[in-house]
Image (cartoon, helix red, strand yellow):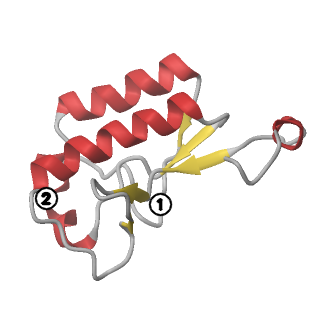
Amino acid sequence: MTCFSKDAVIQLDYALSDALTLPEKDGTRTEIWRPWVKVEDKQEFMERYTDFNVKVMAREPIDIMANPTFLPDCIGKEYDSLWTPDRMKRIIDASVQYGVAIEINSNYRCPASRS
């Protein structure tokens, strides 16, 4: 959020952000929407990703969190098992705590419909 001054953000009708550029342990960033992204440890990825979603809501002056449950293509078919009730609750609790709406995205189907 260093691209815009607080004064500029205040003038907006709303501010939207996402957690789709995930920081890695080595300081690099992974653009998780890219089709070539690979996830070696799914559970570790999910914990870092869930934590990052919460951090974005906590520290950025946003109104809407876009795609908080998006998953990279390589693990997208495991949506229901990876987005556990506990992880979903952490996202929802952060949304309530920080007053941030959660986007429902029909393009990415986020959040996915549960079967």
| Outermost residue, front side | 26
Which quadrant holds residue 20? bottom left
Name the mark on residue 78.
Answer: 2
- Residue with the most extreme bottom position: 36
Q: Give me the C-alpha separation between circle 1 and circle 2.
A: 18 Å
Residue 104 point in image, percent of width and height = 49, 48
Which residue corresponds to the image point at 39% horizontal and 70% vertical from the top-left? Answer: 33
Viewer-closest of 71 and 77: 71
Question: Which residue was labeled with disc 1?
Answer: 106
Q: Counting other residues with Cα less than 10 Å from the Cα at mark 1, is it few (<14), some (14-19), or many (20 or more)? A: few
Local secondary structure at mark 1: loop
Q: Residue at x 19, y 31 (%)?
A: 85
Q: Where is residue 41 in the image (x, y as percent from the top left)?
A: 9, 57
Under mark 1, the amino acid is Ser
Report whether 68 appears left or right of 16: left
Residue shown at 85%/35% (left/top)? 10
Residue 103, position in %: x, y? 53, 45
Q: Where is residue 24 in the image (x, y as percent from the top left)?
A: 31, 57
Q: Could you tell me the amino acid type at mark 2?
A: Glu
Which label sits on residue 3?
Answer: none
User: From this viewpoint, which residue is outermost toward the top?
Assistant: 97
Give the residue drawn at x 29%, y 60%. Answer: 71
- In the shown orientation, is residue 38 left or right of residue 113? left
In the rendered image, the vertical position of residue 100 relative to residue 104, given as above or below = above
Q: Quadrant of residue 84?
A: top left
Q: What element carries label 2?
A: helix
